[in-house]
Image (cartoon, rainbow, N blue to C red):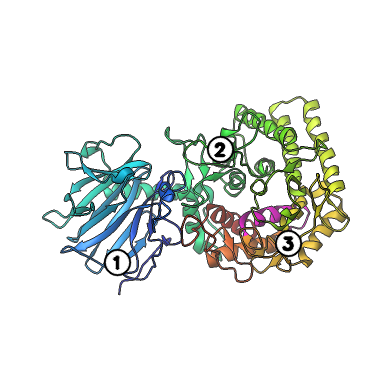
């Protein structure tokens, strides 16, 4: 029996490449076992354009790809290399490579046919032959074009396309994505399959060398898979999408978007390549609105709405200034980031400090980044120690960057004085003498649940008195937050514990925030201990965004839009690289 041989299993991470909105995935209810899969070509634009078709079992999986012999469908397995997807049967195979960001190349040499079954488009529109042997078909929000190089394409009853081999048993073809009316290039202008595979491999190898060329022995076996997952979710400006700097999407389909505070964390994770890290950090400000707010997320098109995420950019900027050679970042680029970050700080006190006491409040759960945390029970607006602590770090980073770019010293001292004042307000409002709480300023109610984010003020490090640092660390260690797999987002001893997104699961941002916070508090020993636990969780259970606090297994079931499971997250894969290198030595 044939067995799937996967560099990365498409059940865990749809197969794509940097900059592409096309990907290959197994069926939503597929399996790796021989005969229990269907390979699909996906359109991932806008978070998976066909997710609007909620009744479709396979959602944004736009085109089913099946091998046929003598008109009969063959049972298959799906295998992958670093640059190819291989659909294999006992009678032969067809190989696919995303040779360019909007171009898939394929070839088969075993006399088999390939059936392509696209989803119907608007008002039932199907595939259409364009008079030159090429066929256009609806492809999510765009149009796909099948271009046969060797073999012929015909339409089957029901609208599927059949690519049949030539007299030598060969099929060779391209599938190209268009946002305008499609037109095939001259055949000589398409890359050859072998050359395309080599080019993709070279691009990926270059990324690996720049970002993480090696890891300690226990983490090395998953290094390239983690690198590939992050690389395959990266987006670059191409003149058509909304991205103006390189950004990293979170995962395929459900969170097919680049989230603001995730970009700040990615800048830390990928900081071995300082230029890449700087661009990713800068990217979040490309759609800063007139009030200074950074949008919650960016897809391939400009977004609207009132969402946002926590202001983690100051922590990231401090990290880059501490650990990277930024000499190749121009003064103009640094000044540009400085100006955007000034507006970001001002936003919180102009639009999120409703009682004007100098401590700002979140106005809804999504703004906190924690979605379903227990401390929301006191209602909104909700002033939180961690959110204001990140703002202090923003102010400190602005003072530091300002001096580097020639901002007058008196202006830099204003940032420092503001940070000093806010730090004291954080202590006065949120520290009880034994633990941290959040406060609803309208009702005066204090949230004292065992929700990990409230202890994020630890990120202030030596800005806090030693007694507060020690008591905070002690409280975390004695109250059910520390598991064998990382920090639980809600104490496992809490009456509010419910797994969930942030109700007790092991999630990526909690691990980075609290490892960096422990370092800031002078406890790198504990940061190393927890960082290694989490890196091993990812190594052993996959690069999922959410893991079970009791077993370490990936929480695949917390999904939406009819998907059976979550896919690997770039947030997790990048964190794996960072923790494994930083703490695994």
Q: Which residues are magenta?
A: 507-525
Q: Can residue 250 be seen here? A: yes
Query: Where does label 1 land, which residue?
Result: 76
Q: Earlier in the sequence, mark 2 or mark 3?
A: 2
Query: Where does label 2 land, which residue?
Result: 279
Callout 3: SS: helix
Residue at 77% over, 66% down: 479
Mark 1 nearby-residue class (10 Å; few <14, some 14–19, many ≥20): many
Mark 3 nearby-residue class (10 Å; few <14, some 14–19, many ≥20): some
In the image, is residue 132 above or below residue 466? above
Query: Where does label 3 land, which residue?
Result: 526
Q: Residue furthest bottom?
A: 1
Q: Is residue 139 left or right of residue 255?
A: left
Distance between the alpha carbons at the discs numbered 3 and 1:
48 Å
Q: Position of residue 227 (x, y in %)?
A: 49, 54
Using the rendered view, name the quadrant where residue 284 is placed.
top right
In the image, is residue 228 above or below residue 363? below
Disc 3 to disc 1: CB gap under 8 Å: no
Q: Position of residue 12 (x, y in %)?
A: 46, 61
Q: Residue furthest front?
A: 123
Location of the N terminus by quadrant is bottom left
Mark 2 nearby-residue class (10 Å; few <14, some 14–19, many ≥20): some
Residue at 27% over, 49% down: 193
């Amino acid at each position: 029996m044939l067995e799937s041989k996967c560099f990365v299993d498409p059940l865990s991470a749809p197969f794509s490449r940097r900059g592409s909105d096309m990907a290959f995935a197994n069926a939503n209810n597929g399996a790796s076992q021989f005969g229990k899969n269907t390979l699909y070509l996906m359109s991932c634009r806008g978070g998976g354009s066909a997710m609007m078709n909620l009744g479709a079992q396979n959602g944004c999986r736009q085109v089913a790809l099946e091998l046929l012999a003598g008109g009969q469908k063959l049972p298959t397995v799906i295998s992958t290399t670093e640059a190819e997807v291989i659909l294999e049967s006992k009678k032969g195979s067809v190989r696919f490579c995303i040779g360019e960001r909007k171009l898939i190349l394929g070839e088969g040499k075993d006399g088999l046919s390939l059936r392509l079954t696209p989803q119907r488009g608007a008002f039932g529109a199907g595939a259409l032959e364009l008079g030159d042997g090429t066929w256009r078909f609806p492809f999510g929000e765009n149009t796909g074009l099948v271009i046969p190089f060797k073999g012929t394409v015909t339409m089957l009853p029901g609208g599927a396309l059949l690519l049949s081999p030539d007299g030598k048993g060969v099929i060779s073809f391209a599938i190209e994505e268009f946002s305008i009316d499609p037109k095939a290039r001259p055949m000589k202008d398409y890359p050859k399959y072998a050359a395309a595979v080599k080019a993709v491999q070279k691009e990926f190898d270059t990324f690996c060398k720049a970002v993480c060329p090696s890891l300690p022995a226990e983490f090395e076996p998953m290094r390239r898979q983690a690198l590939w997952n992050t690389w395959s979710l990266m987006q670059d400006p191409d003149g058509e999408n909304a991205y103006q700097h390189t950004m990293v999407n979170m995962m395929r389909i459900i969170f097919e978007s680049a989230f603001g505070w995730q970009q700040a964390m990615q800048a830390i994770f990928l900081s071995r390549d300082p230029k890449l890290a700087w661009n990713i950090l800068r990217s979040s400000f490309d759609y800063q609105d007139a009030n200074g707010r950074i949008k919650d997320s960016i897809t391939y098109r400009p977004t609207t709405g009132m969402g946002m995420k926590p202001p983690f950019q100051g922590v990231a900027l401090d990290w880059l200034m501490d650990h990277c050679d930024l000499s190749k970042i121009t003064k103009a680029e640094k000044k540009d980031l400085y100006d955007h970050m000034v507006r970001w700080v001002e936003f919180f006190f102009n639009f999120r400090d409703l009682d004007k006491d100098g401590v700002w409040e979140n106005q809804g759960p999504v703004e906190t980044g924690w979605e379903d945390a227990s401390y929301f029970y006191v209602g909104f607006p909700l002033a939180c120690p961690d959110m204001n602590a990140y703002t202090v770090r923003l102010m400190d980073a602005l003072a530091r960057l300002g001096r580097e770019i020639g901002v007058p010293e008196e202006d830099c001292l204003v940032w420092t004085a503001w940070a000093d004042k806010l730090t004291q307000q954080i202590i006065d409002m949120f520290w009880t003498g034994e633990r941290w709480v959040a406060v609803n300023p309208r009702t005066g109610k204090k949230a004292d649940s065992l929700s990990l984010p409230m202890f994020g003020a630890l990120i202030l490090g030596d800005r806090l008195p030693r007694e507060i640092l020690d008591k905070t660390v002690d409280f975390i260690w004695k109250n059910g937050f520390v598991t064998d797999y990382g920090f639980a987002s809600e104490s496992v001893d809490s009456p509010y514990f419910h797994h969930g997104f942030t109700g007790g699961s092991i999630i990526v941002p909690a691990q980075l925030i609290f490892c960096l916070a422990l370092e800031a508090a002078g406890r790198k020993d504990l940061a190393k201990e927890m960082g290694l636990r989490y890196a091993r969780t990812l190594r052993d259970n996959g690069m999922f965004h959410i893991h079970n606090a009791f077993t370490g297994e990936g929480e695949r079931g917390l999904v939406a839009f009819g998907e059976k499971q979550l896919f690997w997250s770039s947030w997790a894969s990048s964190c794996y690289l960072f923790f494994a290198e930083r703490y695994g030595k």
